Image (cartoon, rainbow, N blue to C red):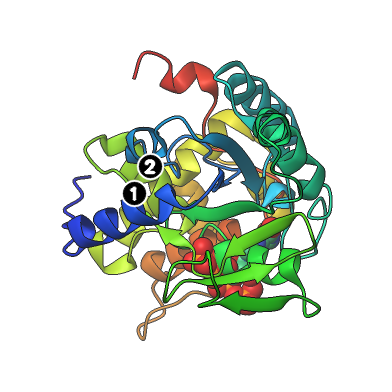
Amino acid sequence: MQFQWYPGHMTKARRAMQEDIKLIDVIIELVDSRVPYSSKNPDIDQLANGKSRILLMNKYDLADPAYSEQWIRYYEEKGYFVAKVNSKKGKGVKAVHDVIKEACKEKIERDRKRGILNRPIRAMIVGIPNVGKSTFINSFAGKACTKTGNKPGVTKGKQWIRLNKNVELLDTPGILWPKFEDQEVGLRLAYIGSIKDELYNLYELSILLLKYLQEKYPDAVAEFYGIPKKETAEEQIAEIAAKRGCLKAGGELDLDKAGKCLVDDFRAGKLGAISLELPTNVENK
Ligand code: G4P
């Protein structure tokens, strides 16, 4: 399956982010834990330019914990401070304060030596669409926070959310765009719903997803739908159609509808905690 995708205003967004990054001490990058590589835009590596980096494995609840542990080690070895969070439920969110402190330890020490005390750490959230940036900010900042802006020392027009006396967060997240040159990356992003459904054939996508599930999570589909396991993805989708009553006007099985049903159930986490890639799939890329 081929993906076509043209991020129109990417250059402008990139330039704006470059300016914002100059103002901050630490970049908090969110990824989707089911695809911690595919949901991460490599451009940020250049934009980050020596800033401290925190990687938040969001939607941790939807991913396979054994896979996530491997990813945490993978990114820690690359120099990131890594934390797993479920922003929707607020799990792991408070601990991010400690991670920020840890990531900025050297900077705080440098400031102290120069006689600068208690200058808040400035942070910025970045990530591709739909990884949960707004959900995380709402959970992390909560209602108690106060917005600060247009005050001396704060660039005009920038709004900061004062999280506590130690941390300020830029209130608009930096949106990066997924990278599509690699078709495998495109496919995984389609599975999780980060690419518009109009850009691919949903039935084909569901067959590819089923093949992956049959290989890596062989019981997930049969268990969730209460259907027998089938040898091929095509037979399995027909079972789903029959079980869910996906029928066309003439009574024939509606496989497109069954495909959509499977993809939706997967995205919502109904098939269980499932990951789509491992560090071994992306090494040397
Ligand atoms: P964005 O700003 O990065 O674009 O993402 P946003 O916060 O809008 O979140 C995208 C979707 O991901 C939302 O679902 C949100 O609820 C969900 N989400 C965010 N964090 C988590 C998490 O840790 N776990 C799970 N399971 N879901 C998460 P939605 O269907 O678009 O909205 P809603 O119906 O959940 O409100």
Q: Are marks 2 and 1 in contact (CB under 8 Å)?
A: yes
Q: Position of residue 95 (x, y in %)?
A: 83, 47
Q: Nearer the viewer, residue 140 or 110?
A: 110
| Measured Cα–Cα span from mark 2 to mark 1 | 6 Å
* Pointer 2 local density, CA inside 10 Å: few below 14, some 14–19, many at least 20: some
Q: Position of residue 34 (x, y in %)?
A: 58, 43
Which quadrant of the picture is home to ligand 1? bottom right
Instruction: Kindly tell me whether residue 264 is visible in this rendering.
Output: no
Which residue is disc 2 drawn over?
A: 41
Q: Nearer the viewer, residue 268 or 97?
A: 97
Which image quadrant: the C terminus?
A: top left
Assign a secondary structure to mark 2. loop
Which residue is disc 1 drawn over?
A: 178
Q: Nearer the viewer, residue 187 or 172?
A: 172
Which image quadrant: the N terminus?
A: top left
Assign a secondary structure to mark 1. loop
Query: Residue at coordinates 64% horizontally, 34% vertically from top-left?
Result: 218
Query: Residue at coordinates 37% horizontally, 66% vertically from top-left?
Result: 256
Instruction: Kindly tell me whether residue 75 is visible in this rendering.
Output: yes
Q: Position of residue 108 (x, y in %)?
A: 71, 36
Is 8 positioned to the left or the right of 112 in the image? Answer: left
